[in-house]
Amino acid sequence: MTRAGTDLCYLTIRDAASLLRRRELSPVELTRAHLERIEQVDKQVQAYVTLLPEEALAEARAAEAAIGRGQYRGPLHGIPVAHKDLYDTRGVRTTAQSKLLEDRVPEEDATAVARLKEAGTVLLGKLALHEFAIGGPYTSLFQPARNPWNPAYVPGGSSSGSGAAIAAGLCMGSLGSDTGGSIRQPASLCGVVGLQPTYGRVSRFGMVPLSWGLDYAGPLTRTVEDAALVLQVIAGHDPRDPATSGAPVQDYSSALREDVRGMTLGLPREFFTASREVDAEYVDIVEKAVGVLQELGARVEDVALPSLEYIRASHWAIMRAEGFAYHRENLRSRFHDYGENVRMQLSIGAIYTAADYVQAQRARTQITREFRRVLQHVDLLVTPTTANPAGKFANIDPRAQLRRPSLTAPFNLTGMPAISVPCGFTAAGLPVGLQIAGKPFDEPTVFRAAYAYQQAARWTERHPAL
Amino acid sequence: MASSPRTRKKATDRVDVKAIVEAAGLKLSAEELKELEPAMQMAYDRLRLLHSVDLKDEEPAFVFRPEEVAP
């Protein structure tokens, strides 16, 4: 690949859009550069499970012609994207990386996919994930995606291919899904940006569900401004997802300012306490990131969230009971068609009774009330995204994974928008993520703080050597 | 009275994984049951914690809105 080709693949969406709009870059050239890079690099990264080169080039040519006719649709027109393979794509196999759905070809697009197509994006293909968005990297179908910063390490999950592809320059934007951290965790471990929007902000129609009450659709991109551009297109009410809100969609890009003066950031100290399960080096890097936000003018305050003690219990009960309900018949009849880890993870859901589920939902209300009370006094909550950097494939331990605290799940439970933005690297050269969460439907404030940090720290300008 | 699959053996305080999965209609081998046991135990322990929380008069977090269901 030419140097120029690699450079094209690491343009931000915002910069590429500016060139495309002025016709200084062709969507065909941009798409070809990505297809070439995929050809050369994806053998190591294994992010793609389905590649659509001919279709992508046809879409790119159509975009080029439309822009040439003056029919520019906006900043995503001609931008190459790829989505987690649990988003339905019309006429393109959608498997959730499971043998159970090996031959499934949807007849229509998921709403978020359709909105991105309408905005003129070019679909390069479908990306790897943890089977049915739970379990671990090894699945019943396809090889696992690998971390572009070091392929011996996992990229996180369950939107593993999305995190890996964005970091490796194999697409410019991706839809991931997040039930307990599945957008933010791979974003953190791969050194990219991942956003879980407010519950109800983005339609989940056409996504293979894991847990209806906790699933979120959202973008992974290389920068905060690109996440804002993607959210702008996919946000909004959808009659086919009754959980979506009719709240007006704000102008997310206008919220991007390099200024956090006057903002108060709440630090839940429990998230920063190193322990057997929480890596000290990791916490130290995130503390430094908080220091950068302070230097930019934000005020920092410790906050207490006593419900953290039982958040995991509530989250597990809702996610696993709903996941078990969805998979029960297949677990009964096709147990061994699931991957080993995912079938075990899903079977845990058999333990929950209706009373347990209702108790978990009641706890969810109480936990959300507590978080909202805290957010009356601070503008945002800031935490590490994960408790540890990426682990090696050779050391995967599903039981240890279950014991590990989740720093992302609290925001699935409370429905609040939360973003992961790169905030440094470990001594081993693995990325670390900073999580910034806000009030429901206050994505603009989340974007503002994340963008201010990004612009000051500049970690998003580093790319893995592949 | 038939015992619940979640009946605890007080001496060992272990959850009866076999009874739970059978009640759910799953057929797991002895080896698979053994593999599932630690995770199921963890789920049970988290449930005990959940039921020990004083939720006062909190209502469940889901609300049914018939007008939002597309025909």
Image: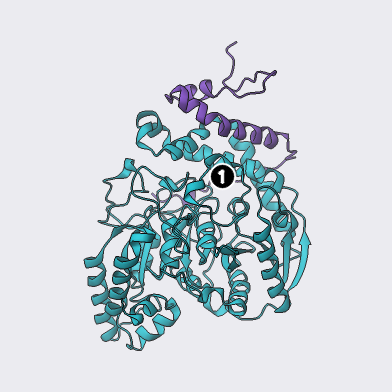
Q: Quadrant of residue B47?
A: top right
Chain A as rendered: colour: cyan
Q: Is residue A219 left or right of residue A410?
A: left
Q: Report how many numbered discs are placed on residues in the image.
A: 1
Nearer to me, A455 or A149: A149
Q: Is residue A112 above or below residue A59?
A: above
- x then y, percent, for residue B66: 49, 47
What colour scheme has been applied to the protein in the rendered image? by chain
Q: Quadrant of the C terminus of chain A?
A: bottom left
Residue furthest to the top: B1
- x then y, percent, for residue A115: 38, 66
Q: Residues within 10 Å of mark 1 (few under 14, many from 20)?
A: few
Identify the residue at horizontal 69%, vertical 57% (top origin): A280
Q: Is residue B28 left or right of residue B59?
A: left
Name the chain letter of the residue that bears numbered label 1. A
Q: Is residue A183 above or below residue A313?
A: below
Residue A183 visible at all: yes
State the residue position of label 1.
A401
Residue B60 visible at all: no
Nearer to me, A355 or B23: B23
- x then y, percent, for residue A428: 56, 62
Q: Quadrant of the N terminus of chain A?
A: bottom left
Identify the residue at horizontal 73%, vertical 74% (top origin): A294
Q: Is residue A438 above or below residue A86?
A: below
Q: Is residue B23 left or right of residue A358?
A: left
Nearer to me, B3 or A455: A455
Identify the residue at horizontal 32%, vertical 44% (top origin): A101
Which type of secondary structure does the marked residue at label 1 adopt? helix
Instruction: Name the amino acid type tagged 1.
Output: Gln
- x then y, percent, for residue A382: 67, 64
The chain displayed purple equals B
